[in-house]
Every structure is written in C-alpha cells, then in structure tokens.
Image (cartoon, coloured by chain):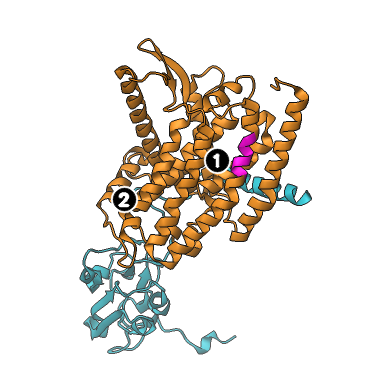
Chain colours: A orange, B cyan
C-alpha cells in the first residue's frame, strides 16, 4: 500500500472502505451461520436433527435468532455497574472483528490498474497486533462479569483472566518459530514464506500448541471455564439478555473464524494451495478449523481449573520454549536459507 | 511420555466415536409429519367396548373407578331391560388420567380398554372430560369373542342360564375329576 503518500488517492480510500465493508459483511454472516452449523453438527453428533424448521433445512434460523435477540428485553441488574455492563459486550466483540484486519484472506488481485492485497491492513507488526488484541478481548469478559454484580458472573470473569495468563504465553511462544522461519512479523510475508511448504510440516509441535491455545482463547469446550454452564449458569454473561448477550455470543464465533484464519495463515499456508483460487483455499481452511472446533466441542468434557493451569504452565509453555530452541538450532545449522 | 500417548489415544478415540455418530441417521421422529405406530397394547385413550351382539359390555360395577389411582372415572349405575345393569352415565376425565391401565385390568367384563390413540390434546381442559357417548365404540376391542352375559347370565329377575341366548350354567360338581 502507498504508505509514503501524504494525501491518499480517493480511489485507494474507496477500495479500502469497500474491502472493510465486505469483510465485515462476510465475517458477521459467517459467524451467524457458524452458530447454526454448530447447532446442526452437535445435533448430528448426538443423533438428533437440530434446527430444521425455519426455511429450507433451517437455513433462516440465524435470522429468527436475530429477531428474537433484538426484541428481547435489554436488562441490567439494578446493583450492577450500568456503564461497564453496557460497554463490556462491545469490548468483547470488537477486538475479535478488528483482528481480522490483519489476516490475508486471498491472493492479491489487480483491480482498476492497481494491485489490491486481499487484506485490510498489511501491518509490518501484524502478529504483534494479533497478540495485543487477543489480550484486550478478555477485558470484555472480565468487565462484563464484574459489572454484573453477580457471583456466577464474577467467578466466570475471574476464570477468564486466569485462563488468559495460562494460554497467552504458550500461544505467543508457539508463534515465535513461525516468525523465525518467515523472518517477518508481517502476515503477508509469513504466507509468502510458505509457498514451498506449509509451516505445519516444519513445526508440527508449534501447530499443536497453537491449536490448543486458540481453543482456550475462544473459550471453546475443553477450556470453556469462564462460561461453564454446568457450574456457573452461563459464567460471565449470566446476567446478560437480548442483543448484548448476542454480542458476546457472536463475538465468540467471530473469534473462532478469526483464530481459524490466523491458524491457517501461520501454519497452513494461508490462502495458498494448488488449483483452486486463494479465496476458496483460505475460507476452506477457516471452515475446516471451525468444524474441528465444533467436533471437539461435541467430544471432550470440560477441564478443571487447575488442569488448565497445569496444561498451560507445565506442559505447553515448556514445550514451546524447547521448540523455539530446537528451531533456532536447526536454523543455525541450515544457514541462511532454511526452507 | 506413556501418559501423553494414552491421553492422545483417548482423545482420538473420542473424536472417532463422535465422527461415526455424525454420519449415523438421527433417531428423531418429526412428530406432526411422521407418526410413530405404537404397539397394539400401548396404553392411551380409553374406550368402552361392546359385546359381539352390539350390547354395552359395561355393567357399571365401579371396579375401574375404585382401581383408578387418580379418581378420574365416575359413573352412575342403572338397570336396563331384562334387569341388565348398565351405566346411566359414565365419565372419564382425561385431564387427570395417568394412563396406568389399572381400570382396564380391573374390568371384569372387558368393557373398558386402552387404545393406542395417543393424540388426545384439547385446547380447552373441559373438552378432555369424555362422556359415555364419547367413550362408547361400535366394536369389541381386543377380545372380539368375549361376551360376559353369555357366561354370567343376567340373573337378577330370571334364573341363571335361562335367559335368551345364554349358555347353561356350568355344573360345578361336574368339573370334579
């Protein structure tokens, strides 16, 4: 992109805005349908049929859900902190959407005589921005639980914070070998570096650690301690109703899409793949990750609080550190061009 | 290390199990469109059957009413033509009925029987109070041959076994070996 220009060309601005609008539309629609897909797939796993009454095959179910959520009462507990209570859902959902800005979701296309990267913002510190935003997202959970002034919600947000410190470190460390191999924090460079071979081939260990960490990051079932409906009613969003609950809920699914996209970008070659166009490859990989998450949800039980801590601090983090050292050693032996 | 391998095997076994279930046919029966056909002895809507001659089997003996654990059966006995007992009115409140089948078990004349018709919802709770004309059917139900009065006789105004079409009384002593 033309970073040096003082006055950006209006065409450029229009294209960027169009791209942002398109990405928002696709992400939000996909997230809504991911909810539907999850309900259907979980039903199949449990030998049920799932929602199939609204529209053909139940395909209009997300719309019905939306109408239901919008028309419900927007309730704030009288003893709660109104301001934080109303702010928290947005604080959970917005960082998830923002993270998608750095994900390259397709091969650059030529449009109106200019190269248009299929990425909203190609930051040279893209990976660091992702780490920062993923840490911010937990504020929505923490403050939502705190502002509810309810013991279940507070316990949920407490667990959310404890969970953050156990997986965040291993997630960051598992990405270090990726950066070492690609020699860049820029996500488009990381994708370009995987042209010869996806990083999962060189870094299966880092991929496994990252996968477990992103499961914890989007609070999915083996690690859904902040929600834990069996123990904490609904955890941090116990007191939420209507569209504010919907925002937390959709935020979670946007998170799945975004983290699936990032996992694809870091380890599965992003939009690269033979024969099919890049867009299809990328979204195919994202949906494969989403399916994996749903499948795991239908299979595994919830971990206990201390088990998650144990896994994060005593297993994943040391493994990630050893992996970094091994990668460094390998890069040192292989010389300047490891791939 | 062995523990890690064991744990991974456990997780993969679980994933394989759920994968098989994704491909399996759902067991759901989509009720209003698909209806289960219950077995003939299914216990649902109660009927009052008739004997093969078309007369009411019910003799208003109150045994079903006494057996009913929720007291949903009530009736009034009266004497019909030829001294034959029958119910003047007979009422089952299906809003209280628990479909236990005790009434059908208690019935000495096989008059009261359970049918597999389970679709007896009504908008108004008062519509669930079934009167005799709602309960009486024009067939013999599960035991089409059985005719109580053929065996028992009416026996109130006339000697047993001597009424029209009645079988002679069994000689009790003649049954001795």
Q: Quadrant of residue A8?
A: top left
Question: The disc numbered 1 marks a residue on which chain?
Answer: A
Q: Residue at x 33, y 71 (%)?
A: B51
> Range of the magenta residues?
A170-176
Q: Is residue B59 left or right of residue A3?
A: left
Q: Which type of secondary structure does the marked residue at label 2 adopt?
A: helix
Q: Nearer the viewer, residue A308 or A45?
A: A308
Please say whether residue A199 is one of the residues in the magenta stretch. Answer: no
Query: According to the image, label 2 marks what residue?
Result: A243
Look at the picture and state if A213 lies above or below B96.
above
Q: Residue B110: horizontal and vertical position, in percent?
A: 38, 74
Query: According to the image, label 1 marks what residue?
Result: A292
Q: Residue at x 45, y 56 (%)?
A: A142
Asked whether residue A212 is in view, the answer is no
Give the Cα distance between marks 1 and 2.
Answer: 27 Å
Q: Residue B127: horizontal and vertical position, in percent?
A: 21, 68
């Amino acid at each position: 992109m033309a970073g040096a220009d003082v006055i950006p060309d209006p065409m450029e601005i229009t294209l960027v805005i169009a791209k942002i609008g398109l990405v928002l539309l696709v992400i939000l629609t996909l997230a809504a349908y991911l909810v539907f897909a999850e309900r259907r797939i979980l039903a199949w796993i449990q030998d049920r049929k799932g929602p199939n009454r609204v529209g053909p095959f139940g395909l209009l179910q997300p719309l019905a859900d939306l109408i239901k959520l919008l028309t419900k009462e927007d309730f704030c507990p009288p003893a709660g902190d109104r301001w934080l209570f109303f702010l928290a859902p947005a604080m959970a959902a917005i960082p998830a959407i923002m993270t998608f800005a750095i994900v390259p979701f397709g091969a650059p296309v030529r449009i109106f005589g200019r190269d248009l990267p299929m990425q909203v913002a190609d930051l040279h510190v893209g990976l660091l921005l992702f780490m920062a935003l993923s840490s911010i997202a937990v504020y929505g959970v923490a403050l939502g639980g705190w502002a509810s002034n309810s013991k279940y919600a507070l316990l949920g947000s407490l667990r959310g914070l404890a969970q953050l410190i156990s997986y965040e470190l291993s997630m960051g460390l598992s990405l270090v070998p990726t950066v070492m191999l690609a020699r860049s924090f820029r996500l488009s460079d990381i994708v370009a570096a995987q042209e010869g071979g996806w990083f999962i081939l060189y870094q299966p260990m880092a991929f496994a650690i990252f996968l477990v960490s992103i499961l914890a990051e989007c609070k999915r079932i083996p690690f859904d301690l902040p929600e834990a409906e069996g123990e904490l009613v609904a955890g941090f969003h116990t007191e939420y109703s209507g569209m504010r609950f919907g925002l937390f809920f959709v935020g979670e699914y946007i998170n799945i899409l975004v983290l699936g996209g990032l996992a694809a970008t870091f380890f599965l070659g992003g939009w690269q793949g033979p024969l099919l166009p890049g867009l299809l490859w990328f979204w195919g990989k994202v949906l494969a990750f989403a399916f994996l998450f749903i499948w795991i949800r239908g299979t595994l039980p919830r971990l206990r609080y201390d088990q998650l801590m144990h896994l994060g601090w005593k297993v994943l983090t040391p493994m990630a550190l050893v992996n970094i050292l091994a990668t460094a050693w390998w890069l040192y032996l292989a010389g300047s061009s490891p791939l | 290390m062995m523990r890690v391998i064991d744990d991974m095997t456990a997780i993969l076994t679980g994933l394989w199990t759920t994968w098989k279930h994704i491909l399996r046919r759902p067991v759901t029966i989509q009720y209003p469109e698909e209806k289960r056909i219950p077995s003939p002895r299914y216990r649902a809507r109660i009927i009052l059957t008739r004997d093969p001659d078309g007369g009411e089997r019910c003799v208003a003996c109150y045994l079903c009413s006494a057996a009913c654990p929720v007291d949903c059966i009530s009736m009034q006995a009266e004497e019909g033509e030829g001294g034959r007992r029958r119910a003047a009115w007979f009422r089952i409140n299906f809003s209280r009925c628990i479909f236990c089948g005790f009434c059908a078990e208690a019935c000495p004349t096989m008059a009261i029987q359970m049918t597999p018709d389970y679709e007896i919802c009504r908008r108004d709770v008062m519509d669930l109070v079934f009167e005799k004309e709602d309960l009486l059917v024009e067939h013999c139900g599960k035991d089409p041959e059985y005719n109580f009065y053929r065996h028992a006789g009416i026996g109130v105004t006339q000697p047993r076994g001597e009424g029209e079409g009645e079988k002679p009384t069994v000689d009790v002593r003649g049954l001795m070996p």
